[in-house]
Image (cartoon, rainbow, N blue to C red):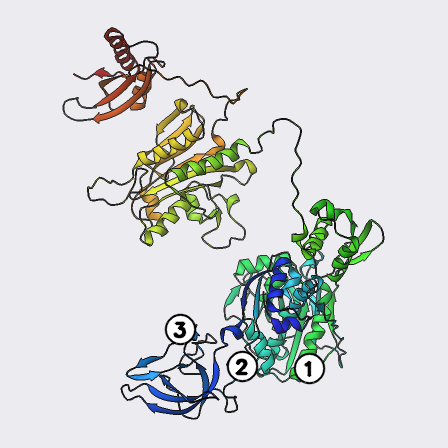
Amino acid sequence: MKLTLSWLRDHLETVASLDEIAETLTRIGLEVEHVEDKAKALAPYVIASVLSAEPHPNADRLRVCRVDLGSGDPIQVVCGAPNARAGMKSVFAPPGTYIPGKDLTLAVVQVRGVESAGMLCSAAELELSEDHDGIIELPADAPVGKPYAEWAGLGDPVIEINLTPNRPDCTSIRGIARDLAAAGIGALKPETVAPIRGTFPCPVPLTLDVSAEDRHLCPAFALRLVRGVKNGPSPEWLQRRLTSIGLRPINRLVDITNLVTFDRGRPLHVFDAAKVAGGLAVRRAKDGEEILALDGRTYRLDEEIVVIADANGPESIAGIMGGEHSGCDEGTTDVLVESALWHPLTIAQTGRRLGIITDARYRFERGVDPAFTVPGLDLATQLILDLCGGEPSEMTFAGEIPERDHAIDFPWTEVKRLSGLDLPRIEAKVILTELGFTVAGQGDRVKVLPPSWRPDIEGKADLVEEVIRIAGLDRVTAQPLPRLDTGVVKPVLTVLQRRTTGAKRELAARGMVEAVTWSFIGHEEATLFGGGAKALQLANPIAADLSDMRPSLVPGLLKAAGRNADRGFSDVALFEVGQCFATDEPEGQSMRAAGLRRGTARHAGGGRHWDGATRAVDVFDAKADAEALLASLGLPMAGLMVAPGGPSWLHPGRSGTLSFGPKNVVGHFGEIHPAVMAAMDIKGTAVVFEIVLDELPLPKYRPTKMKPKLVLSGLQPVSRDFAFVLDSAVPVRDLVQAVGNVDRKLIVATEVFDLYEGPGVGEGKKSVALGVTLQPMEKTLTDTEIDAVSAKIVEAAQKRTGAVLRN
């Protein structure tokens, strides 16, 4: 929402400075994003007269100009503008001036051997427009030496406010002025709209062609004809007012509706009465109907969209945009002015479905003031009569204005109970009254009726919020929380919350960068990763490629890695912890942790190196990340089972499934399937893992959090290597588990350090070399004891996997 300081002062009587107003707006909840003060930025620029413009002796396209600034000797300026000539007046910038359009600060320079002490400026160089074909030409009566910004009326600062969706009243400049007046920054100027008395009946019939169940779509509709108007360009004051907040003036009739929209938060629409066939009717659109809108685009409509139609079909998309056919132009002489109420949810859904964003939609979907429906029509009519002339008809009205009947039973003690601020009752009452609330009753409990322009006020807490934001949050003093005499405080975070935080810490510690991606993905991507169900498709997606709830975190990470690769960062390691969706039921949601590595972004380090030691990531990097994550969360890693294979989006021969027990699958890891990479238009290879945090076994309850006694052996460990030959189809995991289970107290580590298949071991066989570490705790092992353990290891390996010692 943009407004100028002078426009604000049309409604607010104040002597406050711009800084005071901006600070107060943010303090009361209307956050000021930006203040543009062109008068300050353009202060060095002055009006100058060009006395002469001679050709440059060393350049064909340059001129040497002598410029009069109204005082002192003329200044010499080298200018390349084609329209620079003697006798014209333009805008001059002296040395030391910052030129925003060129991002430079002027200095006295030599241009092709001729000194230039300043610059004659174009509108583009001052960022006033995109016109850079020549320097600014000013009228002959422009006063030489006067500051240009002051003469041109550019000294009006523009304030831009970031409105929250619950403040529809502040989509109008008068609403903002009302808040400032309540905050003590000035006084709200009284303003009443005089009713317009028509001189003849409105000849255009008006009907609400909706069923009783659909009456909420358009509760009220007011219409008036003004005949004999003279349309054309708006007066300078109106054009300047609109352009100051970024609007493009069109013609008087359209500019008047834009003025009322921003000034009073009341969107209106004007129809050229000569182009309307028969009467106007508010109805649902028919499937397949089309309308050429004022933005030049043709929109296909359906029964969920409300339109204003005549005998020929839709003439306006209700509450959003009018049609090109009935729009007003220079030849308009009779105009229909419409002021209506529309259902906010319907307007929002229609705007999203059609992809239209307008100032009218912005206000209607938040809720406009129903009580200003008729006064808004009268105000627009009066402006038309003042600027365009004409003769007004009587008003035609359909429907009814909703009554204000939501009085809130409000005890004054709620202010202190909810905010901690012990505010005097009279001050709280004055604040509510200044904001337009009606306060009835005496004593500790009163009845408060919200004004018609505040549909967001529903209960007592809302009233307390209004009082506190105007009184000032800085007046609420900090109070320490009382100590609870309940012994040891129980943990506040759940197991899942602790694991979510712990997962982020562990993955970041492994050199991965956290990514936060959309919870929505495209339908094709959702189908690739096991989703795409009808129940998980969004009714009103914010974009075509964000149509489905994500079944996995991996698609978002893949797209993020692809965008990085497109910009030259091919070696990335990303992770995300977030929600995924298998069904539309609450139990269908799951919290997951996923990680992705691409290129050479391995945990041990990546990138090119002169010794050539760096290699690309592979499936074992993803497996290491997954196991490190599970170990950091305190899972019993001895019970972790790793099985080959995974979901269809992983490479079938380079992937694995993680589980605790045969049925409790907790995640997957592996290389992304090449077909999936091609479908998502991502080159190269990527490895990923994904853990479902909800499926992890819960920690076992311990009566005490005391750690067990640390026992360290002072005896020398013993290592023995074994090379076994076994069938190629036997998982190495089975061999490692068989060896480790021989003596769990003595065997502390079992490591695979070699794997060989080929000549010497037989067809269909493989050689697996294990390093086994024995750690005695009570005495040094003898050779006999070591040989006995080794024999048990060989026997267990042969019994469990059929492995035999390699000769």
* Comes first in the chain, label 2 or label 3: 3
Which of 489 and 379 lies nearest the eye of the viewer?
Answer: 489
Please state which amino acid type lies under the numbered disc 2.
Ala
Label 3 belongs to which residue?
Answer: 105
Q: Which residue is mark 2?
A: 152
Answer with the quarter of the image where residue 67 lies: bottom left
Residue farthest along the front direction in this orientation: 72
Q: CA distance from mark 3 to mark 1?
A: 49 Å
* Mark carried by residue 385: 1
Where residue 482 sits, quadrant-wise, is top right
- Disc 2 crowd, CA 10 A, few/some/many (<14, 14-19, 20+): few
Disc 2 to disc 3, C-alpha distance: 23 Å
User: Which of label 1 and label 2 is nearer to you?
Assistant: 2
Along the line of sight, which residue is nearer the eye, 414 or 49? 49
- Who's the residue at 23% across and 18% down the image? 721
Q: Is residue 372 above or below residue 89?
A: above
Identified by mark 3, the residue type is Thr
Position of 65 relative to 132 (above/below): below
Q: Secondary structure at mark 2?
A: helix
Q: Earlier in the sequence, mark 1 or mark 2?
A: 2
- The reply to whether dot 1 and dot 2 touch (C-beta < 8 Å) is no
- Residue at figure coordinates x 45%, y 52% from the top left: 545
Place of residue 752 in the rendered image (x, y in percent of width and height, measured from the top left): 27, 24
How far separated are the C-alphas under marks 1 and 2? 28 Å
Residue 297 x/y as whole percent: 50, 68
The residue closer to the viewer here, 64 or 205, is: 64
